[in-house]
Amino acid sequence: MPDVSYEILLPGVPVSSRRGALGWCSVVLVRAGGRNILFDTGSYGDRAQLLERLGSIGLAPRDVDLVVASHFHFDHIANAELFGCDVALSERERRYAVEAEYLAANDPFVPRALVPFLAGRLQPLRDGDEVAPGARAVSLPGHTPGTMGLLLEEEGVLLTGDAVKNAWDFVRGAPPPAFHSAATAPENYRRIRQVARTVVPGHDRPFHVLPDGSVAYAASAEVGLDLYADPGSPARPVRLLG
């Protein structure tokens, strides 16, 4: 039986902003086949905390053997430049980024300067490919044409990237923002329910998928904001997750 485990390094945060994308995605360390595999990397604003979290469990960037990117949006791949290893990305998403298909899709979230920097290290993935013993790629297109999840088979844990943004969308069957096709969301959600007992979404805490179709959060987490809105008053903390 494969020895596979996972740890949430940075929890996804289910919050939106009228100013634009905040980009606080789930960053997950998977240990499988004797390898340290990082699923998604977070964005620039996550960088210091990501390095701190890795250090707290005795890892440095050089100890990460593979990055698996769910898709090529800035909030999921920007910190891939910290690591010297290969970056596994679906073959379809590689074309989307490297051949600049994202321009025709009016997708503003692909970090253009990072494409040539990573192009030589992109390792193509296809649906069903084994990333490591017990960890398999699952195609979940829609948000982008090549969005890919990672299934930890024995545990029934599916890391979805933005194929599932949050539990709110999943329960309601609401598609994520789509630069490819929103119409794929119902089939993606059906497939996820078939293979996963626990979902780690792109921008939310992990949740269990229950037989009656409801969900239950697997863990509590809190991400705080401090608002400096009034110079005459103390900063006001805002609690996002309970």
Image: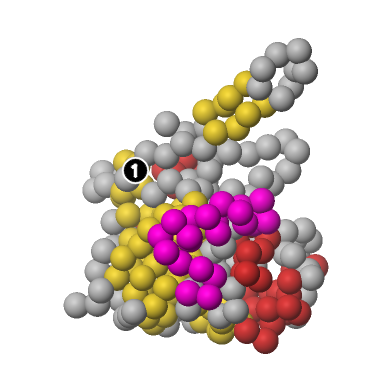
Residue under label 1, please give it: 219
Magenta part, dominant SS = helix
Outermost residue to the bottom: 120
Is 55 in the magenta? yes
**Residue 70 found in image quarter:** bottom right
Residue type, mark 1 in image: Ala
Residue bounds of the magenta highlight: 43-63
Q: Is residue 176 left or right of residue 192?
A: right
Q: Position of residue 124 (x, y in %)?
A: 55, 84
Q: Is residue 135 visible?
A: yes
Q: Position of residue 228 (x, y in %)?
A: 71, 25
Give the tally of numbered discs: 1
**Residue 213 found in image quarter:** top left
Outermost residue to the left: 1
Q: Is residue 148 visible?
A: no
Q: Residue placed at 52% from the left, 37% from the top?
A: 223
Q: Position of residue 130 (x, y in %)?
A: 39, 82
Q: Is residue 220 above or below residue 99?
A: above
Q: Is residue 63 left or right of residue 156?
A: right
The local crowd at label 1, few if under 14, some if 14 to 19, many if 20 or more residues have their Cα within 10 Å, is few
Dot 1 falls on a residue whose secondary structure is loop
Q: Is residue 171 left or right of residue 211?
A: right
- Front residue of this view, candidates 20 and 28: 28
Q: Is residue 151 left or right of residue 67?
A: left
Q: Residue placed at 44% from the left, 72% from the top?
A: 37
